[in-house]
Amino acid sequence: MEWLTSLAPVLSPIFGMAGVLGGAWLVYRGNRRKIETDAQAAEASTFVASVQTVTEGFTKLLEQQRATNAQTLERVTTLENRVERLEEEQRQWRRWKAAAVEYIQQLRAMLAKLYTGPPPSPPREIAEDLVDGPGT
């Protein structure tokens, strides 16, 4: 046991140095894990922020698309209403024209019966419509 005591001045600095190196290694390892954990947390935070940004972008895009679709639907509805109104006006004009042509043909037939001469020639604008009439 004396030999162990005699080695104390040599062993004590060796064990002290081993303890210091072991402690330094543990601190290094802890710091490295903390840095890795922080890096992973930062990466995860960046990923979450990126996903949120993309989600917000898609949400805004979807809202814009919905607004555009609603606006387009409103315009289509307005145009359909205008077309229906114009079609009804066109039908009324056709009925009026048909009635006017029939009336003019009847008047021409009456003139032909009253007078022995031929009825006056119709204006160019309506001449084609009166060609098939009974007075011609």
Image (cartoon, helix red, strand yellow):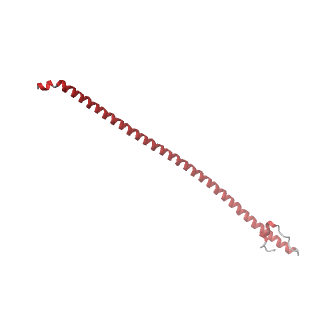
The residue at 40%/40% (across/down) is 43
Of residue 7 and residue 73, the one placed in the foreground of this image is: 7
Instruction: Say above or below: 86 vs 119.
Output: above
Viewer-side residue, 81 vs 127 = 127
Q: Residue 57: where, in percent of width, then height?
A: 50, 45
Q: How many marks?
A: 0
Q: Which residue: 14% across, 24% down?
A: 6
Question: Splitting the image into 4 quarters, where does residue 47 fall?
Answer: top left
Name the quadrant containing residue 132. bottom right
Left or right, residue 128 beside residue 71: right
Residue 91 as seen in the image, left or right of residue 3: right
Residue at the right extreme?
A: 116
Q: Position of residue 15 (x, y in %)?
A: 21, 28
Quarter of the image where the N terminus is located? top left
Residue 41 to residue 21: above or below: below
Residue toward you, 79 or 17: 17
Quadrant of the frame with the C terminus: bottom right
Apparent side of residue 102 relative to residue 33 in the rendered image (left or right): right
The residue under the point 84% across, 70% down is: 121
- Name the residue at 85% across, 75% down: 113
Q: Nearer the viewer, residue 100 or 131?
A: 131
